[in-house]
Amino acid sequence: MADPSSYRPKPGDIPDSPGVYRFRDEHRRVIYVGKAKSLRQRLANYFQDLANLHPRTRTMVTTAASVEWTVVSTEVEALQLEYSWIKEYDPRFNVKYRDDKSYPYLAVTMNEQFPRVQVMRGHKKKGVRYFGPYAHAWAIRDTVDLLLRVFPVRTCSAGVFKNAARTGRPCLLGYIGKCSAPCVERISAEDHRELAEEFCDFMAGRTGTYLRRLEQQMTQAAEEMEYERAARLRDDIGALKKAMEKNAVVLADATDADLVAVAEDELEAAVQIFHVRGGRVRGQRGWVTDKVEEITTGALVEHALQQLYGEESGDAVPKEVLVPALPDPVEPVQQWLTERRGSGVSLRIPQRGDKKALMETVQRNAQQALVLHKTKRASDLTTRSRALEEIADALGLDSAPLRIECYDISHLQGEDVVASMVVFEDGLQRKSEYRRFQIKGFQGQDDVRSMHEVITRRFRRYLAEKERTGEWVDDDGEDVEQDGLQHDGHKDAGLGDDAPKGDGLKDEDGRPRKFAYPPQLVVVDGGQPQVAAARRALDELGIDDIAVCGLAKRLEEVWLPGEDDPVVLPRTSEGLYLLQRVRDEAHRFAITYQRTKRAKRFRAGPLDDVPGLGETRKRALIKHFGSVKKLRSATIDQICEVPGIGRKTAETIAAALAQAAPAAPAVNTATGEIMEDVDESAPGTTAGAAGEPVPAGAPQRRRGQET
């Protein structure tokens, strides 16, 4: 590991001008390429105190042994040179997108005497017109099969073409009218090329001209009573329309644009691109990359644009490129795109309308691509085994942790504090073992104290299960129900009694025990304080055979009890990836529960506190009186008029409403006006600015962040 100060150039030696720099290791291999508006200012950022650098940047500068630079005239030249060097040197610390699949294109070989329509993959060739990419090759073949009725362009290979020319007999497509058969000179080379040009125009989105021409020819043939020709033209029109229907109109103004979306987490990023031509989605592609450097979303977009258009020119670069975040600075990238196209290119973030809606669709595709990539990576048995072994080595465990439990605390500004417990067995989710907790030992926000309480409650139950054979009930009673599994809002029938089947952990009456299966590793979401709290809780219970660690989200550092420095797993470590998945799942599960509790609290109304009053009679009361406000002012005799409400129940309702605070007045959120005379529209709600229900007691204009 090199000391960056050993190869740091003198500040006066670095020019204060645009340029591209390269870091090399001790073997003279280029490990990082970057560009800068000012080389002096940018390089100075790398040679500061190592403690202030991002862990990935710190790894890069300590791996490097030298740095060199090249001065250029403009930022656009720097962008072009950076792309060329990344492609040439393939530096290990640069973001490099890799295709998640080899996408097929519909290609027309305009560089041949008799252009051919075919499916192509791999690098693009000069003189070939490309359309796509498509998700599947069969989608291209279906489209071509429809269009060959109208544009009978050659599709055969060179060998088949030469054989047909030698024998004087065309292939089957020539006989059935789906090829103009230039191999036997049924059409001249010039006319065949014109046919190929028309095919390309149609694929490029200029469809209206050909449809109108065919419709006119069909009408003319019908007027001249050439009904067979008119029928063929009708079928041709149907084929063209069917081919067009495969690509629905997404932008009504026939826009040519590429939409780029990015989904990312701490370690990886996925990019999805939709190619829209003539208002229709003509192709889709995606990439996945490891985030080997500290990088913003705008920088990820810039790298994606470099890879997308680095080898393109002309119409392959659209007039409009829509992105989720702009590179900083944006002007050089926009100028670079303009030079590659040969005319103006707009690079911007969609703000409203159809383009923003389509961008949201592309964003969802990017999120799904990232999830799918992670799922495929996690499903591999060899990969999971390696991940568990790496965790055991990093944490100093005697064996691989086959069962991992992870805990997370969630709240909204100290309210509705809850916790989650998720379980991974052999590197896979065990959702039947998930549990969730309400924090009841204290009020307010204290993640450390909450973590101590949750760990204590969970392992106190574990100890109790070891001592008894029947069903065990906690002293606080309520936990048996509250801690039961409710994954994404769906309760399991056992309310927490669903331990793994077939593992022998059952009572004599056959019911699974609760919390009877101990983990080998407890992971907490957080750093040193949370880890110390979890370890202290286990120590207080006398449990010393369960390992504890924490995963801090900001820098993905693994903390161990009693250690001043974290364990930093390599970026490519499968162990770190598994810990991250476990932590993220615990966070998701906790957030889901916290939101559910908050929603229930906001929906609560004064009638909910009336003992013995069910939903049916609540609805009957509101239907009869119209609102809680009118019900509150009603007499006991008037309440008794409601079907199903006796005098004793009416007295209980009146007493409960008299004690409950009146609902908050309606507020017009646009003007701030208090509308005193607006009736409550339903129990537990007040009317909003536009008549929309607003949760009673909900804070106005209150902002907070869920954790």
Image (cartoon, helix red, strand yellow):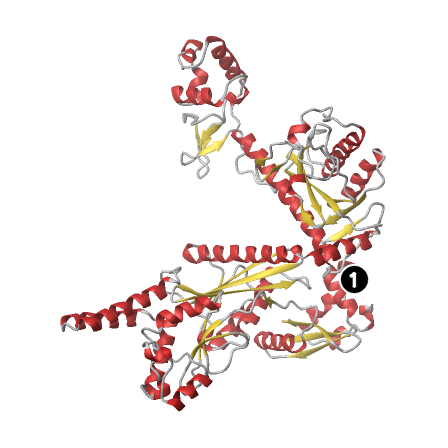
The residue at which mark 1 appears reads as 49
Does residue 544 sit above or below 19 in this rendering?
Answer: above
Q: Mark 1: which secondary structure?
A: loop
Q: Quadrant of the N terminus?
A: bottom right
> To which quarter of the image does residue 25 belong?
bottom right
Q: Which residue is found at the position 32% from the left and 68% from the top?
A: 240
Q: 292 left or right of 106?
A: right
Q: Quadrant of the C terminus?
A: top right
Q: Position of residue 254 (x, y in %)?
A: 36, 65
Residue 197 visible somewhere in the drawing: no
> To which quarter of the image does residue 201 belong?
bottom left
The residue nearer to you, when weighing 82 against 308, is: 308
Q: Which residue is found at the position 70% from the left and 46% from the top?
A: 424
Taking the view exactly as shown, the residue that stands out farthest to the left is 224
Q: Which residue is found at the position 16% from the left and 70% from the top?
A: 222
Q: 353 left or right of 124?
A: left
Check disc 1 and give the amino acid type. Answer: Asp
> To which quarter of the image does residue 192 belong?
bottom left
Q: Position of residue 99 (x, y in %)?
A: 58, 67
* Label 1, residues with CA under 10 Å away: few <14, some 14-19, many ≥20: few
Residue 369 visible somewhere in the drawing: yes
The residue nearer to you, when weighing 400 against 594, is: 400
Q: Position of residue 54 (x, y in %)?
A: 73, 60
Q: Position of residue 259 (x, y in %)?
A: 48, 63
